[in-house]
Image (cartoon, grey):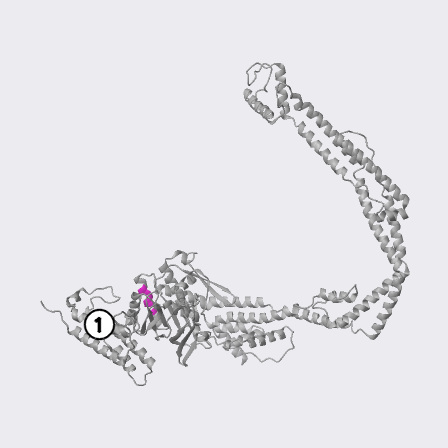
Amino acid sequence: MSNEIELKEKQQPETLESEVKKFADGLPYWYKYLADKRFSGLEITDEIVSTAYSYLLEELELKDKTDKPAINLNPSLQHIGKYKKDLLLTKIEDVEGVNALIEGQKIDFGNNLTIIYGTNGSGKSGYTRLLKQVFYSKSPEDILRNIHIADGHKPVSAKFTFTSSSGESSFLFAEKANAEFKQFSVFDGKSVIRHLDQRNEFEFRPAGLGFFADFNSYISKVEQKMSFDLDLKKAGHTAQDLGDLFEGESEIKEIVKAINPKTKLSDLQKLTPFTEEDKVQKEKIDKAYDELLLASKNKEREIKQLQTNKKLLGENRLALDKLNQYFNTDYIKKIINSIQDYLDKEAIAKSEGIENFKTEKVLQVGSKEWKDLILSAENFAKKQTDGQMEYPNLGDNCLLCHQPLSEEAVQLISNYWVFIKSVAEENANKALETLNKLEVGLSKFNFDLLPDDNTLTTWLDEKYPKELEEIKRFLESQKLLCEEIVSNVKNKHIKEFHPVQIPLIHHQTIEASIDASIEILEKDEQIKELERLEKSKTLLSHKEKFNTHFSKFQSFLENQQWISKAGKANFRKSKTETTITEKTLSDKYFNQRYIDAFNEECEKLDGNFGIEVSHTGSAGKSYRQLKLKGNNPHAVLSEGEQKVIAIADFLAEMKLSEINRGIVFDDPVTSLDETRKSEIAKRLVQECIDKQTIIFTHDLVFVSSLIGHCADLTVEHVCHWIENRSGSPGQIWLNNSPSYEKEYRNAEPSKKHYNEAKKEDCPPMQREFLLKTGFASLRTSYEVLVINDLFKNVVQRFNERVSIDSLNSVYFDSDLIEELQDSFGQCCRYMEGHTHSDKYAYKKPEPINLNEEIQRFEAIRTKIKKYKKPTT
């Protein structure tokens, strides 16, 4: 039977769900536990993470094994937890503390398309900022406080109402973490750059792929728990700290310093306990050691003195050996050669030098100018013969006075040339510099190496007086030789010097004698016994201390073993494998779908600009990057083209989302031409058939295009008017905008508000709201009346075509127009939608006031319809 099941499973085609299950089935138990909770749609609480961590510790043998329930993974990848497939946003109300938005407003949303129209500064951006805070947005913005007031700022607050087959539910702004808010997304102008220039994470993907990013985050939470425990384990003592508890050296100290994860506790336990017998033995050895130490103090002191003297003697020998290097035959010969070298070079310099040219007839001989003159003369002389022969020769003329040169003059000029080429003077100076360095160096030698008050001198005078006297005599001879050499170097005088070498044989003999004396003292049985007792004493002292601090050693060993086992939990490898699997499955089941969806959106929006899509993965997540021939589209495309591509990218991702139920746009067609506006309007109307769509805009042409496409596709829509009233933005007029001309061809909208307001059970505040809205509706009806009836539809809103033929039927009667204006003013008198003129001061409306104005409107409307242009 099991073989048949396995065969059926093999025959089943692979799906994203089956491949995710295959990945999860191959994981250790603690991983599978987390995966099972994720598949069940549960929120991964700290308690669940702690349980998974406990299972990991069992796996690493850091906890005792427990009986664990079997896990049969059944990933329901279509399960979307608390997300609802039929979710709708129905209204936003009670908005406070958002920019300068006026309070007490409400926005109702239709099931398909909702348009909120208003001019710049009317408050649309305030509502967009609010929605970007609660819904998904690539460019969330902080909500600003009202800068027009100094104090009294309220915290951000708003009430959002949703509906689904489960019923209606409302949430406050502070409850934006609820799942309902995650099912809506916002696109605005600030999102464009994020879509085009940056690497963007796929926020909405198949639930199966979302598993991997979640899973890596769960692994990180478990890793954090282990890191915390590791820090605690590492925060205790180190092996060096424990070794420092023991003074001196013993095998126990070495055992403590060598504790590592491989150390066996049983080996440490062999050093326990510190018995009463050990205590008695320690006291016995301490007493014997102290008695013997007192008796051997003199010998110890003598050994230390001998060792000190040997050290000083060795240092003295090295100093004497260094002096000998400068007063041997070879070095003295080098000094004499240096003096002779200088004398030779000085003589050459004198024979070829400047002295030969000095005369009373010419001043400044030897100066720079004099040398420059000779150099220039030689160079000029070479040009007289073209290199054929040297100048001068007997019979040549002087280059300056042109007189024939005498034999003496020829010789003088030739000597000049020789002088120029000579380096004798420079060589003489270098030789003199060498002698000066020798003089300075020899003058610094110290021959007072055995002063009378020196410790070594005193000891040698007592033990080896003859040897000391001979060493001092040679030092004095060497000193006199040095002074004589310095004098001859200084006076450049050559003399034969006899080398002086201080004999070092005495040092070798004395050092050997010291070693022999130390050896004799150390071979003393008393010293040997003292060393043996000290070793036994240290060992027992260390054993006592080891038992006192045994718990520290045991704890340290357990921590080291825990750390070693914990190191087998390779979280980085687990995360990498998760990311690789996610990328593989994303490439297989999602990435191409996204590319196809993106290209399809570009096609629908006439945005085939050659955009390429690349995909990368990191930490169990997928990212995409848009490129245009290797460049960021933002750097190549026009502003309008950029917006088209960004919208296509946004719609493509939302299209593939399993949870997204609504999209919000803030002025999506800014800076676009009318053709582009119409294309985008059509696409968004198509989208609102499947997803609730909300659009904030200030563009009347775009509003008209949206409404037109809704009519073409038989799609329901609602349109509200938002305005800035007396400096307070955010005034909402529900179902009251230019988009509702067909509904306002008569006074029916106002009558509906009147009928509700006059009911006896209507609350006062609700009645006032209904009356004001009724007057606003009546005002719109007047606007439609002027366009359709008074002007006979010659010029229609949002329509480029002007009906010239209808001009024949247009006629204006001043009395009728005055009556219409007065009635229109009465409506403005009662509504809060406009700034009131002095003529029409605001007063609180009553139902009778609205009914009176409705009757006046219908009367005027009847007059206009019956009124005909007089015949001439």
Image coordinates for residue 59, horizontal then vertical, percent: 62, 74
Quadrant of the rendered image containing residue 606: bottom left
Residue 170 visible in image? yes
- Which amino acid is tagged 1? Asp
Image coordinates for residue 782, horizontal then vertical, percent: 23, 72
Would you call the spot at circle 1 few (<14 residues within 10 Å), some (14-19), or many (20 or more)? few
- Which segment did they paint magenta? 677-684
Magenta stretch, main secondary structure class: helix
The local secondary structure at tag 1 comes to helix
- Residue occupying image coordinates x 72% and y 36%: 437
- Residue occupying image coordinates x 33% and y 61%: 672
Work out whether residue 340 or residue 642 is closer to the camera in this orientation and state it: 340
**Residue bearing mark 1:** 822
Q: Which of the image's four quarters has the C terminus?
A: bottom left
Work out whether residue 725 or residue 221 is closer to the camera in this orientation and state it: 725
Residue 92 colored in magenta in the image: no
